[in-house]
C-alpha cells in the first residue's frame, strides 16, 4: 500500500495495486509513454474520419482502444521514483502529478468519462456527434497535459 498511499482517492479505479509489483522505473515510464503514444495514434485516426470520409468501423476500433487504455489503471505507472528518469526517452511528467492528488484525480476521471462516452456513442452516433465528442475527449487529454506534463527535454 505504500505506493498507493500517495493517491488514496478512487485508488481502486485509478491505481490498481498489482501493476506496480516488480516494475522498474524505466519500465513504468516506457509503459506510460507507450500507452499515451498509442492513444495518440487512435486519436489521429478518429480525427481523420471526422474531418474526411467517415469510416465507422475505424472510429469504433479507435474509440475502443482509447477506452481500454483509459480504463487500464495507468495511474499505477506513476510509481514513486519515476518523477525523473527515462523510458523510451526522458520523462516529461511534472512533479505535481505525484503531489496534487485532488487535481490529478479530477483530470483523470474526466478523461476516463470522455473516453467511455466516445466508445459508447461511436457505433451509432452521427459523424457530427462523434466530432463533438472527439473535441471533448481531446480537451480532457489537454486538461491533464496543461498541468502535469512538461515540455520535451
Ligand atoms: C492524467 C493525465 C494525462 C491524461 C488524461 C493524458 N495524458 Fe498524455 N501524458 C501525460 C503525461 C504525464 C505524459 C508524460 C509521460 C512521461 O514522459 O513519463 C504524457 C505524454 C503523452 C504523449 C507523449 C508520449 C511520449 O512518448 O513522449 C502523448 C502523445 C500523449 N501524452 C497523448 C495523450 C492523449 C492523446 C491523451 C488523451 C486521449 C492523453 N495523452 C491523456 C498525462 C496525461
Image (cartoon, rainbow, N blue to C red):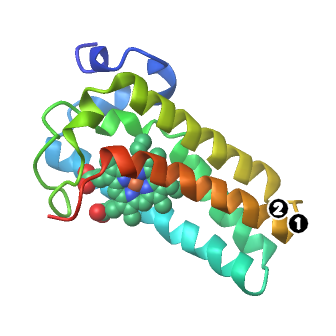
Mark 1 crowdedness (10 Å alpha carbons): few <14, some 14-19, many ≥20 = some
- Residue 71 got which mark? none
The kind of secondary structure element at disc 1 is loop
> Residue at position x 72%, y 69% from top?
59
Measured along the vertical axis of the image, is residue 37 above or below residue 137? below
For the point 87% across and 60% down, which residue is it? Answer: 125
At a point 25% along the width and 54% down the height, the residue shown is 150
Can residue 15 be seen at all in this image of the molecule? no
Q: Quadrant of the C terminus?
A: bottom left
Q: Is mark 2 within 8 Å of ligand 1?
A: no
Badge 2 is on which residue? Answer: 129
Image coords of residue 113 (percent x, y): 64, 39
Rendered position, 123 above or below 1: below
- Is 30 positioned to the left or the right of 56 in the image? left
The image position of residue 85, as x and y in percent, is: 10, 50
Helix, strand or loop for disc 2: helix
Left or right: where 110 falls relative to 31: right
Ligand 1 image position (quadrant)? bottom left
| Dot label at residue 126 | 1
Asked where in the image residue 129 lies, by quadrant, the reply is bottom right
Q: Are marks 1 and 2 in contact (CB under 8 Å)?
A: yes
Residue 30 position within the rendered picture, expressed as x and y whole percent measured from the top left? 25, 55
Q: Quadrant of residue 99?
A: top left
Pointer 2: residues within 10 angstroms few (<14), some, or many (20+)? some
| Spatial CA span between label 1 and label 2 | 5 Å
Amino acid at each position: 500500500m505504500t505506493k498507493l498511499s500517495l493517491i488514496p482517492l478512487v485508488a481502486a479505479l485509478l491505481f490498481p495495486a498489482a501493476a506496480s509489483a516488480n516494475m522498474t522505473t524505466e519500465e513504468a515510464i516506457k509503459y506510460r509513454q507507450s500507452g499515451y503514444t498509442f492513444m495518440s495514434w487512435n486519436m489521429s485516426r478518429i480525427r481523420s474520419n471526422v474531418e474526411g470520409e467517415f469510416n465507422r468501423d475505424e472510429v469504433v476500433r479507435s474509440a475502443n482502444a482509447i477506452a481500454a487504455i483509459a480504463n487500464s489503471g495507468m495511474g499505477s505507472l506513476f510509481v514513486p521514483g519515476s518523477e525523473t528518469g527515462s523510458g523510451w526517452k526522458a520523462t516529461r511528467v511534472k512533479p505535481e502529478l505525484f503531489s496534487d492528488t485532488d487535481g490529478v484525480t479530477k483530470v483523470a476521471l474526466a478523461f476516463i468519462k470522455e473516453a467511455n462516452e466516445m466508445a459508447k456513442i461511436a457505433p451509432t452516433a452521427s459523424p457530427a456527434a462523434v466530432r463533438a465528442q472527439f473535441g471533448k475527449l481531446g480537451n480532457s487529454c489537454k486538461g491533464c497535459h496543461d498541468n502535469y506534463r512538461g515540455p520535451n527535454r
